[in-house]
Amino acid sequence: MNLEDYKDIFEPFEKLVEIEIAGAKREVPENNSLLRCFQFLSMETISYGDFCWNGDCLNCRVWIKNGEKEKAVISCRTKVEEGMEIVRLSEEIKVEK
């Protein structure tokens, strides 16, 4: 992917950070929402997915590891953090391996 072609959809970032998605380590742009990070990883499936991008639909819900428990968050309103561990994704989120 040529990031210059998509620079207007991502928040400005200087580096990629590593997160874990369902057991797989992936690198995504810092300073962006999780949903934008999923779009970075899988431009076509996320861009054309059934997402409202503003938190109303809950289709972008994911579960992150929070200590020994899981915490549900809405990925369009949650900023990525280095080392974040996403343990489950809603069925609507299709991220290419």
Image (cartoon, rainbow, N blue to C red):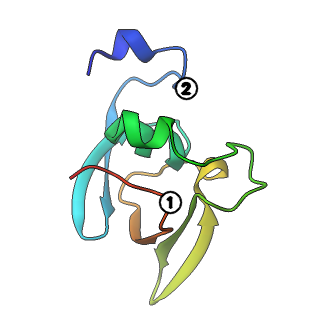
Q: Amino acid at mark 1?
A: Glu
Q: Residue at point 51% right, 21% down?
A: 12
Could you say which is closer to the camera, residue 48 or residue 41? 48
Q: Position of residue 55 (x, y in %)?
A: 74, 53
Please say if 94 is above or below 32: below
Could you say which is closer to the camera, residue 69 or residue 93? 93
Q: Amino acid at mark 2?
A: Glu
Q: Position of residue 33 (x, y in %)?
A: 56, 43
Please say if 92 is above or below 1: below
Residue 11's label in the rendered image is 2
**Residue 70 visible (yes or no):** yes
Q: Give the residue at mark 1.
A: 92
Q: Residue at point 22% right, 57% down?
A: 25
Choose mark 1 or mark 2, whichever is in front: 1
Label 1: state its secondary structure.
loop
Please say if 68 is above or below 7: below
Q: CA distance from mark 1 to mark 2?
A: 23 Å
